[in-house]
Structure formats: structure tokens, C-alpha cells
Amino acid sequence: MNLKKGSDYKNYSVFLDLIEENFTQKKHVTDYVKMMGITTKTLNIATRRVSGISAKDLINKRIILEIKRLLSLGELLLFEISNELGFDEPSNMTKFFKRYTGTSPKNFIKNS
């Protein structure tokens, strides 16, 4: 493994840990690069080399996974999930979910 590839894996790994700790409050790549002390370009190169997708897509995938998990549990209402995940309005979460999954949270629940 060359040095560049090693730094890509290190940046990717640190980024994933930061996403896991912060995705409910921080949804922008710029938040993470500030915490990591690297550039957006460096982070995107690392995430694309390791995972094949952009840094923003990794953040979004984690948020979608958590929405699906919470919806599947059935313990919280949509507005409670929205609040827990740091969305300003439940409608923003619904639009976000539909944009990335092609279905609404209500249809996701119905079809689960």
C-alpha cells in the first residue's frame, strides 16, 4: 500500500467515525473537513477511492439508514424522528427521505 492510499484509508476511517458521532447535528461536508483539518477535495478523493461515492453521499446514506431504522422500530412519530435527527421541520426530513429513497416515510412504513 502506498503512502497516498494509506492516507486515503485513514481519512476515510476518521470520517466514518465522525459521521457516526455527529450525523444528527452535522449534515455538511464542510463541518467534517473542519474537524479533520483537511480540504473538501482531499476528503472527497479519499471517500471516492475507498468507497466509490462522495463524502456527501456517505453522510446522506447514514442519515437515511437511521431514518429507516427508526421508522422500522415504530416507536417514534415522524416529527419525533425529524427532531432526533436534527431536521428543522418534519417536512424537510420527508423531502430528504423521498429524494434519496424514492418513497415517502409513510409508504416505507406501509411496505415494511
Image (cartoon, helix red, strand yellow):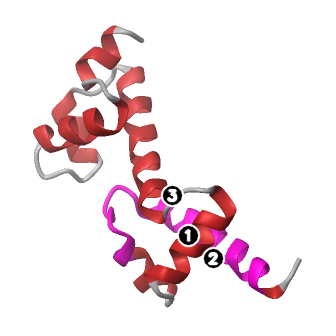
* Quarter-of-image position of residue 45: bottom right
Would you say the residues marked 2 and 3 are in contact, meaning their CB atoms lie under 8 Å apart? no
Q: CA distance from mark 1 to mark 2?
A: 6 Å
**Secondary structure type for disc 2:** helix
Three-letter amino acid code at the position of disc 3: Glu
103 lies left or right of 64: left
Would you say the residues marked 1 and 2 are in contact, meaning their CB atoms lie under 8 Å apart? yes
In depth, the one of 103 and 76 nearer the eye is 103
Question: Residue 26, how many percent across, how many down?
Answer: 33, 65
Where 106 falls versus 46 (above or below)?
above
Over which residues does the magenta segment extend? 4-31
Work out whether mark 3 precedes mark 1 in sequence or the reverse, and give the earlier one: 1
Question: Residue 75, how many percent across, how many down?
Answer: 33, 23
* Residue to which mark 3 is pinned: 20
- Main SS, magenta residues: helix
* Residue to which mark 2 is pinned: 11
